Amino acid sequence: MTPATAPTAPRIVGAFEHPGRNLPGYTMERLYQEIAAAALTDAGLGVDDIDGMLTSTVPGGPVALAETLGLTRLRHIDGTDLGGASYVAHAGRAARLVEDGVCSAVLVIMGGLPRQNLTPRPWAAPTGPFEEAHGSTLIATYALVAQRFMHEYGVRSRDLAEIKSAAALHASHNPNAYLRNEVTVEEVLESPWMAEPLHRLDCCVTTDGGGAFVVVSDEIARTLRSDGPRILAMDEGYMHSNNGAYDLTTGIAATTGPNALAEAGVSVSDIDYASIYDSFTITVLANMVGIGFFTPEEAPRVLASGALRAPFGSIPVNTDGGGLCNNHPDRRGGMVRMIEAVRQLRGRANPQVQIASPEFAVVHGSGFSLGTRAAGATVILQKGEAA
Amino acid sequence: MSEHATGGVDDGSSPLPYLEVETTVDTERFWSELAAGRFVLPWCSRCDTWVWQPRPICPRCLEEADAERRWSGEGAVYSFSIVHRGTPGFDAGGPYVLSYVTLDDGPTVMSNIVGAGALDVAIGDRVRLVGPVENVKVGACRFELIAA
């Protein structure tokens, strides 16, 4: 397929991942201010240039965040909470705001301090008691997905462990990563069970921190002489119990992935880099199968081939180390997945994992739990040329 | 393990607690029936469907569910996890089984597999509902394996 590029698509001109992973003494306000300042500096913009702000659940609601950040020219605020998928969906929502002329510069921002017990949480779901009564945990609900993949397709623990091992390799090159040690497949398999078939090393880290990025029109991006990538497409979707009818192996990505690729006019074979939500190893497998990188039957061969490992794998994934090893601030990984894709397309990833001349990247975010109710969003990005 | 035509009794080999989870005016009948070993849900005759999770209004047509049905309590395991790091009170007695069970002609519900052989459960295994031995206000979807 010949990619249909969109030369005037909105661009991401600034992006910043907070280097902190454990931030005692921080307030949420300070964290958000540091993140906003650094993202705006990277963009070459000031507070008064921002006329759109997209975030998620924040203390006091999004207007309180605008107050903290000193944003006085906002024409649009969005505090939609899609869990960790929020900021991937927001990339597409920001692009639409710019394309529609509602906003000229949109700040997408998140932060959290779960290690300090400072974290905004949405209201408990009304279905919570039906899970609590049975001793459900977030990890166990993902384990239900993993068990079903194993039953239907013969996926093995060893295949999931390859995903962690690749993430750990990438994190070993990231000086800011929370976990920087390399991990073998055997070490994953020998780590304690959390909820079978998921081991401790199948699970993401929990970190303080956050990040932000700024979306502007192509015209403004050229004025800024930005090398930031184009947002070609975004598609989002949702799943829930649907009156008691689960299909745990056909995820949201099976809809949003193909839709986003089609909208962008590219195929998975055109994708040079993938940021795939990795709350757990099974999250990566389920989402990559959904997007169409491989079938579940092909997963053992593809994963064992080192496909996910940068820079030479056939489809390098999460080259910062992902949520499994690098950073999963506030248990909402979508922002950091976006930022690493921006780094790759700007040629600013850590040198050992920088892919040679990447043109297209896919980012997929998963929010809440693929085992109960979830949101998902897929974004397609294209490298932008500095004017 | 005692045998019952429908439902059954948890013989006490299960260490899992019956938590007094939050109930509402909409859900308390479901939980109290479950505490008596019966699986009962609102039924919408217009849509010819149950209402899961239990509510007085059907999620398909958004009108009042006009009936109620009781299930046999038998079904099959759709998926499961043996949970080693669980919630307070659940993993005190060692690993336990969190499951999705698809009731015969019914919804797929979050549940536990308990009793003999629970930790050897497999997807597709036939199971039947078991009720608590002691009086509890709020039941739970607990199933035991039906010997093949």
Image (cartoon, coloured by chain):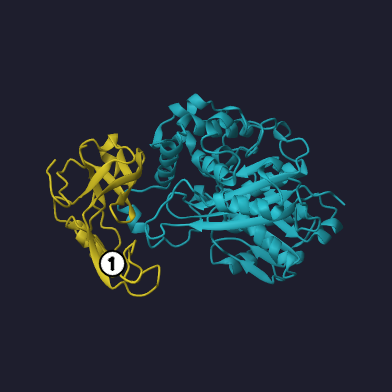
Residue placed farthest to the bottom in the image? B63
Residue A36 found in image quarter = bottom right
Residue B45 found in image quarter = bottom left
Horizontal relation, residue B113 to residue A346: left or right: left
Q: Position of residue A374 (x, y in %)?
A: 49, 54
Q: Position of residue A116 (x, y in %)?
A: 50, 49
Between B6 and A353, the one lying in front of the other is B6
Kindly identify the amino acid type of the residue bearing the numbered disc 1: Pro
Residue A290 in the image: above or below residue A91: above
Residue B116 in the image: above or below residue A381: above
Residue B40 in the image: above or below residue A191: below
Horizontal relation, residue A159 to residue B92: left or right: right
For the question of whether residue A297 can be seen, the reply is yes
What quarter of the picture does the C terminus of chain B occupy?
top left
Q: Position of residue B24 (x, y in %)?
A: 30, 67
**Which residue is depicted at the point 61% across and 66% down?**
A78
Residue A151 found in image quarter = top left
Chain drawn cyan in the picture: A
**Which residue is depicted at the point 63% across and 62% down?**
A54
Give the total of numbered labels. Answer: 1
Residue that mark 1 sits on: B42
For the question of whether residue A31 can be seen, the reply is no
What quarter of the picture does the N terminus of chain B occupy?
top left
- Binning the other alpha carbons within 10 Å of mark 1 as few (below 14), some (14 to 19) or many (20 upward) gives many
Q: Position of residue A282 (x, y in %)?
A: 49, 40
Kindly state the secondary structure of the residue where label 1 is placed. strand
**Which residue is depicted at the point 60% across and 61% down?**
A55
Q: Name the chain letter of the residue that bears numbered label 1.
A: B
Between A84 and B49, the one lying in front of the other is B49
**Which residue is depicted at the point 76% across and 51% down?**
A4
* Chain B: drawing colour: yellow
Horizontal relation, residue A147 to residue B12: left or right: right
